[in-house]
Image (cartoon, rainbow, N blue to C red):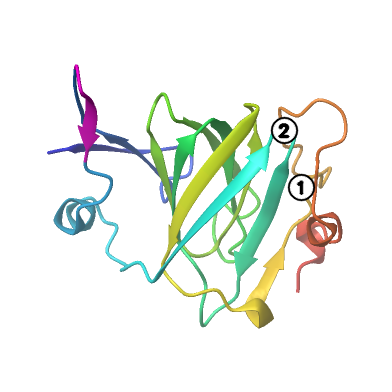
């Protein structure tokens, strides 16, 4: 199989390690294969793909989308390195309010699958990072919401020196306990 699938601290969050074939020309790897992902329990089809480029110190998140278009995400890094985070925001979940992280980079070529019901965010660790992610639902701005990146009850140890570079939207999200 061209992939190794590993559950992280939260069992719904899956770190995917692709098999990479390198030779003097460069490398080849499969980044997605429906049958292998389905066999690993990732059965929802992807409906949109996004590409972002960010500079060191940028923090994007924590973002989510409400039902009926809650998004799962498959995150990859084409260039650079990020500290990637998934936060369980499902109130009925025994792991509500818990989060897990993974370092994704061009060097390790790992991917992270985050199912619907989780907020997602990342901090850029390299000078520049290019992140590509597939989503299980199309973007619906009227259903978007989020959680403050610096919610003191979550105590996330973001690896950003000083004040991170944030969008105005990401500065204004409520704390987890205040989500409606």
- 132 horizontally vs 109: left or right: right
Q: Residue at x 41, y 51 (%)?
A: 12
Q: Is residue 7 above or below residue 93?
A: above
Name the image quarter holding residue 17: top left
Residue 119 location (% of width, % of height) = 61, 57
Residue 81 location (% of width, % of height) = 55, 30
Q: Mark 1: which secondary structure? A: loop
**Cα–Cα gap, marks 2 and 1:** 9 Å
User: In the image, which residues are magenta?
Assistant: 24-29
63 or 141: nearer the viewer: 141
Q: Pointer 2 and pointer 1: residues touching (CB < 8 Å)? A: yes
Q: Is residue 126 above or below residue 174?
A: above
Name the image quarter holding residue 180: bottom right
In the picture, the disc for residue 149 is 1
95 or 151: nearer the viewer: 151
In the picture, the disc for residue 158 is 2
Task: Looking at this view, name the residue that lies furthest to the front.
Answer: 25
Residue 66 location (% of width, % of height) = 60, 75
Q: Mark 2: which secondary structure? A: loop
């Amino acid at each position: 199989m061209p992939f190794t699938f590993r559950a992280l601290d939260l069992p719904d969050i899956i770190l995917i390690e692709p098999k990479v074939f390198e030779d003097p020309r460069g490398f080849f790897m499969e980044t997605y294969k429906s049958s292998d992902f389905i066999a690993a329990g990732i059965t929802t089809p992807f409906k949109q793909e996004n590409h972002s480029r960010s500079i060191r110190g940028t923090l994007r998140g924590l973002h989510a989308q409400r039902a009926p278009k809650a998004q799962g995400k498959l995150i990859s890094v084409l260039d650079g390195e990020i500290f990637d985070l998934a936060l369980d925001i499902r109130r009925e979940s025994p792991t509500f309010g818990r989060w897990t992280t993974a370092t994704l980079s061009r060097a390790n070529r790992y991917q992270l699958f985050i199912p619907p019901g989780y907020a997602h965010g990342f901090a850029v660790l390299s000078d520049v990072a290019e992140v590509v992610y597939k989503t299980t639902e199309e973007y619906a701005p009227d259903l978007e919401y989020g959680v403050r990146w610096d919610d003191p009850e979550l105590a996330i140890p973001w690896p950003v020196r000083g004040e991170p570079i944030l969008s105005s939207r990401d500065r204004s999200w409520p704390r987890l306990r205040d989500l409606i």
